[in-house]
Image (cartoon, rainbow, N blue to C red):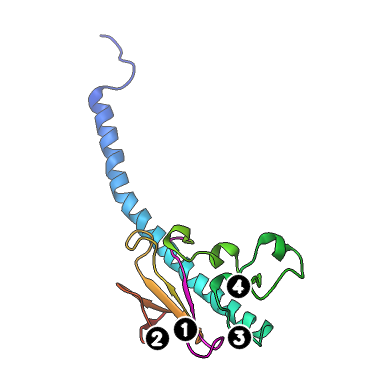
Amino acid sequence: MRRQKGFSLIELLIVVTIILIIAAIAIPNFMRSKMSANESSAAVSLRVINSAEITYASAYSSVGYSVALSDLGGTPVACAVGTGATQTGACLIDNVLAHASAAGTAKSGYYFLYAPGAGNAGTTYTVQAPPAIPGVTGGRYFFTDQTNVIRYGLTSQPDTTSSPL
């Protein structure tokens, strides 16, 4: 009787089948946990924007809240020096977050639509945070304003009457 070296085709097929079954179980769980992490990141980013708006309104009291989300950011070169902060580049948030204003420039699967308040400039603002690809990068939509309450919607963009986090 001869000793075989290696594996038979049946043994290899069984191993490949087991690996595919494990992958079929693990990949959806991985995607759900990635969506959950992106949602957490979006909520934290909105909290950072709210804190930056309060600081901005204190630092530039004649202006109030910023005119654009990009005003809260700043270039790394300007922010590296102590006197680099300006009204249009306050160096209060990361520049990646400050420019995440479209699906193509999303930060952690979400982008942020900033709108200064209508009427009394500098006294109100709103920020909407929809997922870049709904159902893939995130499942919930987020909203905040000058009240500093972060709200969410499950299927559409929330507003001031939506459930808070």
Q: Is residue 109 magenta?
A: yes
Inspect the image, locate mark 4, and give the three-letter code of the amino acid beneath it. Leu
| Mark drawn on residue 149 | 1
Residue 148 placement (x, y as % from top left): 51, 83
Outermost right residue: 82
Q: CA distance from mark 4 to mark 3?
A: 12 Å
Magenta span covers which residues? 108-124
Closest to the observer, 148 or 24: 148
Q: CA distance from mark 2 to mark 4?
A: 23 Å
Residue at image mark 4 = 72
Q: Is residue 95 magenta?
A: no
Q: Earlier in the sequence, mark 1 or mark 4?
A: 4
Magenta stretch, main secondary structure class: loop
Q: Of helix, strand and loop, which one carries label 2? A: loop
Inspect the image, locate mark 3, and give the three-letter code of the amino acid beneath it. Gly
Tally of marks: 4
| Mark drawn on residue 64 | 3
Residue at image mark 2 = 160
Residue 146 placement (x, y as % from top left): 51, 85
| Horizontal arrangement in the rendering, residue 81 relative to residue 25 (left or right) | right
Question: CB atoms at circles 3 and 1 under 8 Å apart?
Answer: no
Q: Mark 3 or mark 1, which is nearer to you? A: 3
Q: Of helix, strand and loop, which one carries label 4? A: helix
